[in-house]
Image (cartoon, rainbow, N blue to C red):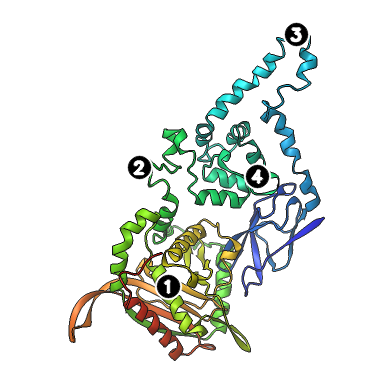
Amino acid sequence: MVTTIKMPQLGESVTEGTIERWLVKEGDQVAQYDPLFEVVTDKVNAEVPAEVAGTITRIIVGDGETVKVGTPLAEIDEGSAAAEPPPPVAEAPALEMPAPEPVAVAEPVAAPEPVAAPEPVAAPEPALEPIASEPVAAAAVPAPMAEPPAPAPTEDAGPATDASMRMTPAVRRLVREHGIDVGQLSGSGAAGRVTRDDVLAYIERGAATPAPASAPTSAPEPVAPSTSAAPPPAPAPAPVAAAAAAPAYAAPAPMPAPVGGDTEVPMSQMRKGIAAKMTRVKQTVPHAYTVIEVDMHNVVRWRETNQAGYKAREGIGISYVAAVIKAVTEGLRQHPTLNSQFAEDRIILKQAMNIGIAVAVDNGLLVPVIANADQLSISGVNHRVQDLAARARTNKLRLDEIQGGTFTVNNTGWFGSVSSMPIVNSPEVAILSMEAIVKRPVVVTIEGEDVITIRPMMNMTCSFDHRVLDGAQVGNFLADVRKRLEGWDPATPLG
């Protein structure tokens, strides 16, 4: 049976997408949910997984082509999925020599000479034992991706044989990128195939079980539970580095001094998509804006009180974005019209509170979505913010993480902005922009007396669709959000 893979709809208003690049080629076998290609739309760059297992028999649309949603892209022959076992069978004799020791081939040839029989059997065993005894050391050396071909024989010769053979090229690449010992992976796919989700789950667990085997090579990648201060950074480098990288936007290299005429720089597919959507939204959505300032004194004190303990426990810092999102979701409960969508002749009040977070990337802007953010604790929101931001910058977001947003929070303050006017992420009807927290002299009332003091202040701008919302509705919503942030209890639990 042949299944046709079509261009998916990656958002309610998305009508087309561009094939950035194929991760497989014709003739490749894939398991269900293995990534097939990277697709780019406006504000989206994601991998599209296979709907079924089988063999790629035909790729219809090539790299760089832009097509409408629903356009056939490739064909997968499900019947040839049964042919998947042949690769393991081809290498099984070489990989599982201990089992075939008493094979009939050795007996007829060596029957007259018993001495000759042990020799062929003994030859493979020495080669097998050293590799099996030190799988971690052997795999850890080529782990940094320096020699992609080298890990293949090493992995195939050890206990990880089945796992390494039952991986698509895209999954093998992911394994090499993270320097993972294939012997530590267990496949959940058909016939024990290791899928992309298996690798990602292993990475999230810390990818550190091989640590004790080799002291010199364990420092860069595994989690060492009983070592001194050196290993603890190792378990958390991925999330911590991502958290640190979040505010550190890599500015493009400065342009050299002009030596000739103007230079034309082609637009990336993502930039073209952003340009098209932003033009369409500004032409069709009547924008209005409301700005308020918030005294973040209590939130700052709360964060400073909990930061060290939380970072030691969770491996990541506390983001102000998590506190603002929590206040926003509580505000949306009181003002559900802001958590809605415009649909020409009606307004759709959304049941779920799926909060989008704008993330700056090298080639544009992505808006991953925290599903049901109102049901998460502050710590849960904080983990989701940092995880989504990190994976957005490495193009590792799943399809379900970039669609279904109902309200967007934009943190322009991380680069020092104190005032901005964001564009509504249509079909949503509002977007909140949090600016930099700046210490300023303000007048506050203490015990009935007005005094001038220094407080950490933050501006918040709400852009909204004036077809659905008016200034009074948005003003009341912002007042409630401000009330929650200014009245933040320093004893507020994170969990």
The image shows residue 265, relative to residue 123, as above or below, that is below
Determine which residue is flagged by label 4: 167
Residues under labels 4 and 2: Cα distance? 33 Å
Residues under labels 3 and 4: Cα distance? 42 Å
**Residue at 37 percent of width and 54 percent of height:** 313
Mark before the other along the chain sequence, 3 or 2: 3
Query: Nearer the observer, disc 3 or disc 2?
Result: 3
Residues under labels 1 and 3: Cα distance? 79 Å
Residues under labels 1 and 4: Cα distance? 40 Å
Picture quadrant where residue 340 is located = bottom right
Residue 421, image x, y percentages:
43, 78
Marks 2,1: beta carbons within 8 A: no
Mark before the other along the chain sequence, 1 or 3: 3
The image shows residue 283, relative to residue 226, as above or below, that is below
Mark before the other along the chain sequence, 4 or 2: 4
Amino acid type of disc 1? Lys
Determine which residue is flagged by label 1: 326
Seen as rendered, the residue at the extreme right is 1
Marks 3,2: beta carbons within 8 A: no
Quarter that holds the N terminus: bottom right
**Residue at 45 percent of width and 33 percent of height:** 214
Quarter that holds the C terminus: bottom left
Please tell me whether mark 1 sits on a helix, a strand or a loop: helix
Determine which residue is flagged by label 2: 230
Q: Nearer the viewer, residue 199 or 133?
A: 133
Please tell me whether mark 2 sits on a helix, a strand or a loop: loop
Query: Nearer the observer, disc 1 or disc 4?
Result: 1
Determine which residue is flagged by label 3: 113
Please tell me whether mark 3 sits on a helix, a strand or a loop: loop
